[in-house]
Image: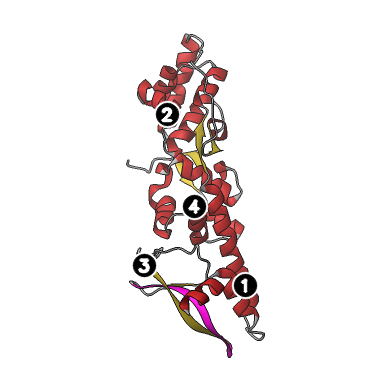
Amino acid sequence: MDTEKEKEGVNMDRPTKCPRCGGELVIEYKTFEVDGHRAENVPVLTCSKCGIYLVDTQLFIDITERAEDFKDKDQLLEELKEIKEDEEIRDILKQYTFQNHIKEVLNEKGISLRRLANMLEVSPNYIHILTKNQSTSIRTALKMAYALGTDVNRLYTLKKIGSKYKEPEKVVYVRTTKEIKERDKQIKEELKKMEVKVYVDEVLKKKGLKRAQLATRLDISPQEMYNIVKIRKGSTGIETALKMAYALDVDINELFRLEKVEKEAGK
């Protein structure tokens, strides 16, 4: 009997583990009541460990639509539809990763790996590793873009997992002159006074979204989302930053900016 109900009411490709605690999800049948209107034998997935239950979004929409006098029905339906959209964005982003274009930009600018490393005060080997598509922070990516006089979107993009990218075989650069060395020194000093400012909350407010929704789109926990905004900030990985921009349909520079930091008096 339960098997027949399962076929009728619950997707057979349903999740088997609780998203909160990892416990096993089992099918139960519950009764929902909205403003006096009852819907019985609604199949839900219940965690045998922590007790939370999950109900299919469309199924819940159907239930609430039957409650004609439900005061906040329109708002609730809109929120449920947003959840569906958030999950769709999440599923799209799972198909993508990041791709660096550092060597391309170095060739365009005639700048060597060693010269870039000197401006960023890191080892040339570290820059070499980054050109092999090793992940880095949004802070390093923004500072690299500043040093090269380009946009971070030129250095890093999203690409579909499995797609091929042919990087330049070598970096062709122009020999440094006294003027170039002075300019590099100036950039190095400027970068020492700059730090990444995070404007995620401001963009969310403008978009009428919540952090929890963005967390869903990025397939991360609300706690991780909080860490990105309030704790990690400039240490956020470049892939996460790129996906965040995609998820919110904004330029990455609207979320993370390299700005001059004024030192407090006495420090």
Q: Which mark is residue 218?
A: 4
Q: Is residue 81 magenta?
A: no
Q: What segment carries the magenta color?
A: 35-48
Q: Is residue 2 left or right of residue 24?
A: right
- Sequence-first tag of 4 and 3: 3
Rounded to the nearest angstrom, the CA distance separating label 1 from label 2 is: 45 Å
Q: Is residue 58 above or below residue 88?
A: below
Query: Dot 1 corresponds to which residue?
Result: 77
Question: The disc labelled 4 sits on which kind of residue?
Answer: Leu
Picture residue at 48% right of the left edge, 61% below the top = 212
Secondary structure beneath dot 1 equals helix
Q: CA distance from mark 4 to mark 2?
A: 23 Å
Q: Residue at x 39, y 58 (%)?
A: 223
SS of the residue under disc 4: helix
> Residue placed at 62% from the left, 72% from the top?
77
Mark 2 or mark 3: which is in front?
3
Which residue carries the number 2 mark? 130
Say what amino acid the circle numbered 2 marks: Leu
- Nearest to N terminus: mark 1 or mark 2: 1
